[in-house]
């Protein structure tokens, strides 16, 4: 199927809008159907990750469609993790080399920018349109609005309707569609930390309060406030369930995070009012049937601990666009190659995101872990082409596939496990024979 197509995108979130832009610029007629109202008029739902960490993979896609300026103008650089221990001591762990950072960006502002840009490109938006049925064989969709239900037929459909995708549901009902989902035992609750806290919370950092079985993180907002997210078990001795009473929850919170607890004047109110949301991983395959394709969270939702869900979705769009170039807009050929090429990468980032939860909540506060990072960082600074730390490969090297980063990261971990067993490594690490370490990374 080549030539100008009439394409429906279900979901006007981050990925749907970006893919719409790419496809409209290829000369296609694009309609985006979104169940929510227009975000330019109504703010996004409270309690749903207000700001996001945007890194190189996502930025590269935004730059390709000419929206790199939103990053430069509105995002706040975060140079590393600021770890807060129970006593209020701070340890700063840089994310990469000097000049490497990730960006805190407002989900709402980014979404609005994408909607404006898409509209300018001639894309038609249908807000308050919930997709309730997809007929894969005829490429038709049914939508429900407040008043009516309509059916429409298209040349192709992109399901960018998020982790609980209705489009995917149609695929799930067919033969030989593989699907798995996993809820982790933690949920999350967001907090607003008001502006004026710059003495306690450094603006250009992602703050973490790792407490082993749970953690709090905070990302800066442009107005000087921070958005905090508590990742906490649903059930158990200290959990959303056991601390359902806001008074008990408040005293637990203040005890666990004393430095930040004092900054939130309406803590009890927020604990009571802000919703608890769950965290899910979804893997499925194939991503395409007939002329319908799943993209972004609809095909690969991941837990947020690597800050890569949106970045991966944006990378999907860029890679698909590249394959449409390669195959001269032959949708069938491009999609077939896209899903085979991309699936190992999204599986890899889904595993890495789970692993990073453990790193963030348990390890960042661990002295051995900090030493390990220091040694890796020294190797990288001396031999930048031969040893790139896993976090850097994922976050700063958009030219390295997630699956390759995962493979090399596993190898690095094995080598570093041995290095860390060397007696007195904490005092002798500066004398480490780095050539031997590097030789191992080259061996298969
Ligand atoms: P969504 O953003 O879910 O958008 C889907 C859209 O489809 C929505 O607008 C929805 O209203 C619409 N829709 C759904 N069903 C229908 C229907 N039936 N009909 C019509 N419309 C429909 N990623 C990062 O890269 N960095 C981060 O720091 C980061 N932090 C996160 C923190 C948290 C707490 C969470 C939960 C996620 C985080 N993510 C992060 C992941 C990121 O939010 C997602 O990967 C990203 O939003 C996926 O975009 P999407 O467009 O595929 O899906």
Image (spheres, rainbow, N blue to C red):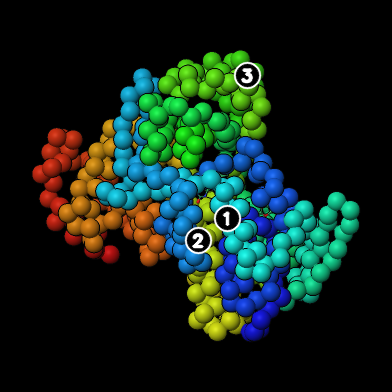
Residue 343 visible in the current orientation:
no
Q: Which residue is mark 2?
A: 67
Q: Marks 3 and 2: which is nearer the front?
A: 2
Quadrant assignment for the N terminus: bottom right
Quick one: label 3 or label 2, which is nearer the N terminus?
A: 2
Q: Marks 1 and 3: which is nearer the front?
A: 1
Residue 349 image point, x, y percent = 47, 55
Q: Which of the 4 quarters of the picture holds residue 423? A: top left
Element under disc 1: helix
Dot 3 surroundings within 10 Å: few (below 14), some, or many (20 or more)? some
Q: Which residue is mark 3?
A: 246
Compute the Cα span from label 1 to label 3. Answer: 37 Å
Marks 1 and 2 in Cβ contact (< 8 Å) = yes
Q: Is residue 126 above or below residue 8?
A: above
Most distant residue in the left direction: 431
Q: Is residue 429 above or below residue 60?
A: above
Residue at (60% x, 72% y) in the render: 23
Compute the Cα span from label 3 to label 2. Answer: 42 Å
Residue 258 image point, x, y percent = 44, 19
Marks 3 and 2 in Cβ contact (< 8 Å) = no
Q: How many marks?
A: 3
Marks 1 and 3 in Cβ contact (< 8 Å) = no
Element under disc 2: loop
Residue 115 visible in the current orientation:
yes
Quick one: label 1 or label 3, which is nearer the N terminus?
A: 1
């Amino acid at each position: 199927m080549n030539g100008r197509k009439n394409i429906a995108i279900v979901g006007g979130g981050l990925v749907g809008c970006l893919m719409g832009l790419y496809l409209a610029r290829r000369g296609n007629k694009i309609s985006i159907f979104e169940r929510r109202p227009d975000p330019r008029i109504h703010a996004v739902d409270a309690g749903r990750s207000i700001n996001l960490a945007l890194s190189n993979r996502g930025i590269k896609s935004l730059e390709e469609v000419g929206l790199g300026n939103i990053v430069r103008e509105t995002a706040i650089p975060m140079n590393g993790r600021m770890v807060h221990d129970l006593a209020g001591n701070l340890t700063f762990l840089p994310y990469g080399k000097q000049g490497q950072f990730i960006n805190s960006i407002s989900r709402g502002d980014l979404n609005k920018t994408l909607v404006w840009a898409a509209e300018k490109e001639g894309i038609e938006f249908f807000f308050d349109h919930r997709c309730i049925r997809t007929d894969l064989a005829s490429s038709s969709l049914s939508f429900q609005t407040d008043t009516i239900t309509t059916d429409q037929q298209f040349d192709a459909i992109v399901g960018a309707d998020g982790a609980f995708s209705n489009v995917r549901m149609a695929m799930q009902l067919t033969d030989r569609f593989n699907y798995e989902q996993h809820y982790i035992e933690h949920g999350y609750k967001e907090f607003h930390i008001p502006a004026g806290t710059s003495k306690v919370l450094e603006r250009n950092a992602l703050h973490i309060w790792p407490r082993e079985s749970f953690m709090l993180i905070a990302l800066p907002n442009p107005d000087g406030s921070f958005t905090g997210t508590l990742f906490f078990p649903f059930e158990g001795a200290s959990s959303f369930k056991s601390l359902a009473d806001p008074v008990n929850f408040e005293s637990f919170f203040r005890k666990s995070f004393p430095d930040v607890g004092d900054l939130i004047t309406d803590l009890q109110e927020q604990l009571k009012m802000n919703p608890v949301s769950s965290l899910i991983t979804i893997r499925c395959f194939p991503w395409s049937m007939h002329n319908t394709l799943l993209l972004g969270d609809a095909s690969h939702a991941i837990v947020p601990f690597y800050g890569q869900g949106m970045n991966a979705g944006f990378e999907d769009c860029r890679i698909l666009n590249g394959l449409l170039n390669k195959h001269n807009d032959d949708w069938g050929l491009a999609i077939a190659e896209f899903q085979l090429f991309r699936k190992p990468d999204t599986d890899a980032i889904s595993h890495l995101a789970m692993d990073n939860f453990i790193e963030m909540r348990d390890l960042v506060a661990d002295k051995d872990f900090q030493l390990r990072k220091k040694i890796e960082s020294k190797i990288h600074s001396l031999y930048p082409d031969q040893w790139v730390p896993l976090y850097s490969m994922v976050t700063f090297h958009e030219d390295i596939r997630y699956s390759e980063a995962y493979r090399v990261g596993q190898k690095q971990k094995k080598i570093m496990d041995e290095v860390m067993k060397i007696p007195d490594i904490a005092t002798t690490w500066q004398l480490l024979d780095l050539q031997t370490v590097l030789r191992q990374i080259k061996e298969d």
